Image (cartoon, helix red, strand yellow):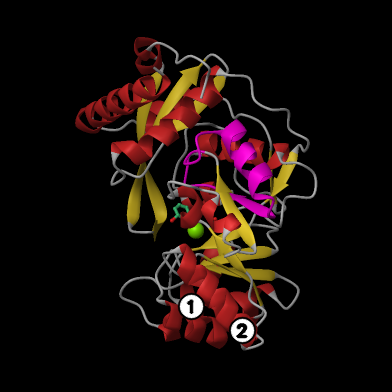
């Protein structure tokens, strides 16, 4: 967050709210709403999912104000390798999804989707491995969907596909530690990555301290911005993968900036920053979609035509103005 908050009136004056359809249903989302700021340091984005409460969303606003109103740590890289993100689709849809991620040699596959069974996950991951070949890296993300016993069963069943890692198989830090220990005891070589245990935790470092994960998934918006996220990475001292939240290209550029500013040697693989490919539109004429498996580091210019085309309804815009106003009040109270 900037050392002092920019005035709320200035923040709201610079803000446009967009509603962008997704190409494929992703974590239940079919229209992605975001607040975009045409800010002094460059375009910025505030896009916590609509169901998040204000206490959680306030960190996302801190990130947006930081990125839009403050100089950022210097990036070391000018491009970032990204993974293909495969939603919980049927196997016959996988090829169509992967086509949207040209050149990507890593895929992250959603598993443990509510309403589906393990056989659905196995079939989807099998199809990804078949299409990408033996040299590709394939990781899965359960988004806390399994119990410890289900995670051990599922990850044992998926072991034949040689997973790079499993992201957030269970909800709690002790459960992650338990799954990790049980898989090791059984000789399975599946690393555990923590995502929700970092971005939704009151203490994002608890999972690292407990030794419950092999690597961390780091997201700029939920962690309060690039500088704050870098601080967490330094303290956790675990390898990281930077990911996003189905942001527009503006939010993705914040994630790419974070990945590019990480201390040398901390980045553990391709980042989850290719998801503009899952959106049907964007707020710029130069979307940060993967080309040859990478996205560039740098802020895309906003396009008036795109902002107009994707503009949210007056009702939804008013909802976002109120949300920003409430979250801003929380940040102001914290800073006081
Ligand atoms: O990491 C990726 O490949 C893309 C981003 C991604 O998976 C997510 C984006 C938005 C919400 C989250 O449920 C989800 C994640 O859990 O990492
Ligand atoms: Mg995740």
The residue drawn where x is 47% and y is 38% is 282
In the picture, measured across the screen, residue 10 lies left or right of residue 81, that is left
- Residue 7 image position (x, y, % from top left): 39, 10
Above or below residue 183? Residue 298 is above
Pointer 1 residue: 91
- Residue 85 image position (x, y, % from top left): 54, 60
Label 2: state its secondary structure: helix
The residue drawn where x is 59% and y is 82% is 183
Pointer 2 residue: 159
The residue drawn where x is 65% and y is 35% is 257
- Residue 318 image position (x, y, % from top left): 23, 26
Span of residues in magenta: 221-247
| Disc with the residue nearer the chain's start (2 vs 1) | 1
Mark 2 surroundings within 10 Å by alpha-carbon count, few (fewer than 14), some (14 through 19), many (20 or more): some
Above or below residue 25? Residue 163 is below
Can residue 100 be seen from the camera position used here? no
In the picture, measured across the screen, residue 43 lies left or right of residue 58, that is right
- Residue 314 image position (x, y, % from top left): 22, 27
Is 238 magenta? The answer is yes
The residue drawn where x is 24% and y is 26% is 322
**120, 103: nearer the viewer:** 120
In the picture, measured across the screen, residue 301 lies left or right of residue 33, that is right
Is 240 magenta? The answer is yes
The verdict on label 1 being within 8 Å of ligand 1 is: no
**1, 95: nearer the viewer:** 1
**243, 82: nearer the viewer:** 243
**12, 239: nearer the viewer:** 239
Label 1: state its secondary structure: helix
């Amino acid at each position: 967050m900037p050392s002092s908050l920019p005035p709320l009136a200035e923040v709201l004056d610079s803000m446009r709210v967009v509603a962008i359809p997704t190409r494929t249903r992703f974590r239940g989302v079919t229209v992605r709403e975001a607040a975009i700021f045409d800010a002094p340091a460059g375009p910025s984005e505030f896009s916590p999912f609509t169901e998040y409460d204000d206490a959680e969303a306030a960190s996302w606003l801190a990130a947006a104000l930081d990125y839009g109103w403050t100089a950022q740590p210097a990036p070391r890289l000018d491009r970032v390798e990204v993974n293909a993100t495969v939603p919980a689709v049927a196997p016959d849809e996988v090829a169509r999804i992967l086509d949207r991620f040209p050149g990507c040699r890593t895929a992250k596959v959603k598993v443990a989707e509510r309403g589906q069974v393990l056989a659905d996950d196995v079939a989807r991951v099998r199809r990804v491995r078949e299409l990408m070949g033996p040299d590709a890296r394939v990781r899965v993300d359960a988004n806390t969907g399994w119990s410890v016993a289900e995670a051990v069963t599922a990850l044992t069943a998926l072991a034949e596909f040689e997973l790079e890692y499993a992201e957030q198989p269970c909800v709690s830090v002790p459960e992650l530690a338990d799954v990790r220990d049980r898989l090791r005891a059984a000789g399975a070589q599946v690393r555990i990555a923590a995502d929700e245990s970092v971005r939704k935790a009151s203490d994002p470092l608890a999972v690292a301290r407990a030794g419950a994960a092999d690597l961390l998934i780091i997201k700029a918006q939920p962690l309060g911005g690039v500088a704050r996220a870098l601080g967490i990475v330094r303290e956790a001292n675990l390898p990281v993968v930077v990911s996003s939240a189905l942001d527009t290209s503006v939010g993705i550029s914040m994630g790419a900036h974070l990945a590019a500013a990480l201390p040398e040697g901390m980045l553990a693989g391709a980042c989850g920053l290719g998801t503009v490919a899952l959106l049907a539109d964007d707020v710029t004429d130069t979307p940060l979609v993967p080309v040859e498996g990478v996205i560039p580091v740098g802020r895309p210019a906003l396009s008036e035509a795109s902002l107009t085309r994707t503009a949210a309804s007056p009702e939804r815009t008013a909802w976002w103005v109120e949300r920003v106003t409430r979250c801003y009040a929380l940040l102001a109270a914290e800073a006081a």
